[in-house]
Image (cartoon, helix red, strand yellow):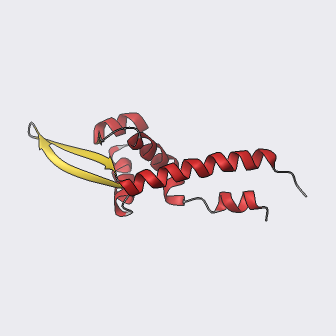
Amino acid sequence: MSSVFAEIAALDKLLHEPARLSLMTALSACKSADFLALQRLTGLTSGNLSVHLSKLEESGLVVMEKQFVDKRPNTQVQITEKGRQVIENHWRQLENLRRDAQNWRPD
């Protein structure tokens, strides 16, 4: 198998999933974001967003802080240093893959 295709197959599946890639990209651009802002940004349902955030939290890529603000639940989400490194590396991999794919020619 050509190395470009092997590299594509080896992409981090946890991070490459479109909803999680969107979340991590958004979180890498800010200090933190609340659940509703992330929901509006991604268009995910609250249940779907919750599942994706839980997977990211279990992997140590984000931390969530749940609190009450004016007697309403509020969840703040923040990318961790590990998460910041992982998303930066992922985008670098994608940029390299794009370049390699543009230069790829069948044998």
Residue under the point 77% across and 44% down: 102
Q: Quadrant of the N terminus?
A: bottom right
Position of residue 74 relative to residue 17, above or below, is: above
Name the spot of residue 41 as percent of width and height, x first. Answer: 40, 34
How many numbered tags mark residues here?
0
Q: Quadrant of the C terminus?
A: bottom right
Q: Nearer the viewer, residue 105 or 71?
A: 105
Name the spot of residue 43 as percent of width and height, x first. Answer: 42, 37
Say left or right for 27 vs 70.
right
Residue under the point 81% across and 50% down: 104
Residue under the point 36% across and 61% down: 60
Residue under the point 35% across and 63% down: 58
Q: Residue furthest left?
A: 71
Say left or right for 8 vs 86.
right
Q: In which quarter of the image is residue 29?
A: top left
Is there any visible trace of residue 13 in the rendered image? yes
Say left or right for 107 vs 31.
right
Is there any visible trace of residue 17 in the rendered image? no
Q: Which residue lies furthest to the bottom in this view?
A: 1
Name the spot of residue 50 as percent of width and height, x first. Answer: 33, 51
Q: In which quarter of the image is residue 74?
A: top left
Q: Nearer the viewer, residue 98 or 85?
A: 85
